[in-house]
Image (cartoon, rainbow, N blue to C red):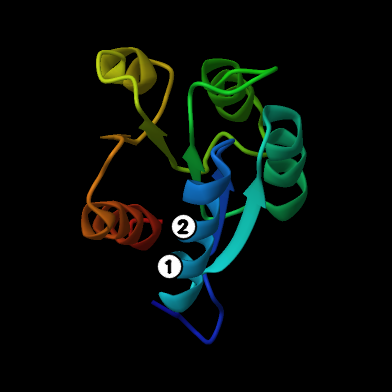
Amino acid sequence: METSGEKKKVLIIEDETELLTILQIRLSHAQFEVFAASDGNSGLELAQSVKPDIILLDIMMPGIDGFTILREIKGSDSTCEIPVIVVTARDRIEDSCLLEGAEGFLTKPFDYRELENAINRLVSAE
């Protein structure tokens, strides 16, 4: 997954600690540089400072919810081009997420290979 010796950066914004840890480990093994935030404020700060190649975003989180984060990311000149895959337990919101600018949508529980394929597809399309 490396291109020109540089790892692609993935930002995971997820409040479920167990899932966050699993994704960090698996994506690190898949040669991504992984950044993680367990709440919306930290996620927005990391999106601005790290400028990841892709963001995995949960919708249901305490404080700032994922819809607000998605709007902020897509509404900012510095982060609007970053692809976002929404990963959520809510299965009836795909259309809303896509209308807000998300490039991908997966319902929990999801198949990890499906997630990795979606990430690879979006980061190679840059």
Q: Residues within 10 Å of mark 1 (few under 14, many from 20)?
A: some
Question: x, y (%) of residue 36?
Answer: 64, 51
Q: Image quarter for residue 66?
A: top right
Question: x, y (%) of residue 94?
Answer: 28, 20
Up the image or down, 10 lies above or below 31; here it is: above
Q: Residues within 10 Å of mark 2 (few under 14, many from 20)?
A: some
Q: How many marks?
A: 2
Report whether residue 10 is seen.
Answer: yes
Q: Image quarter for residue 7?
A: bottom right
Do the residues bearing badges 1 and 2 touch, measured as CB atoms within 8 Å?
A: yes
Q: 67 or 25, which lies in front?
A: 25
Q: Is residue 93 left or right of residue 28?
A: left
- The amino acid at mark 2 is Leu
Toward the bottom, the furthest residue is 5
Label 1 belongs to which residue? 26
Up the image or down, 4 lies above or below 90; here it is: below
Question: x, y (%) of residue 121?
Answer: 28, 57
Report whether residue 31 is seen.
Answer: no
Quarter of the image for the C terminus: give it: bottom left
Q: Which residue: 40% across, 30% down?
A: 102
Q: CA distance from mark 1 to mark 2?
A: 5 Å
Up the image or down, 38 lies above or below 50; here it is: above
Q: Secondary structure at mark 2?
A: helix
Toward the front, the furthest residue is 18
Q: Which residue: 52% across, 17% down?
A: 67
Label 2 belongs to which residue? 23
Q: Is residue 70 left or right of residue 40?
A: left
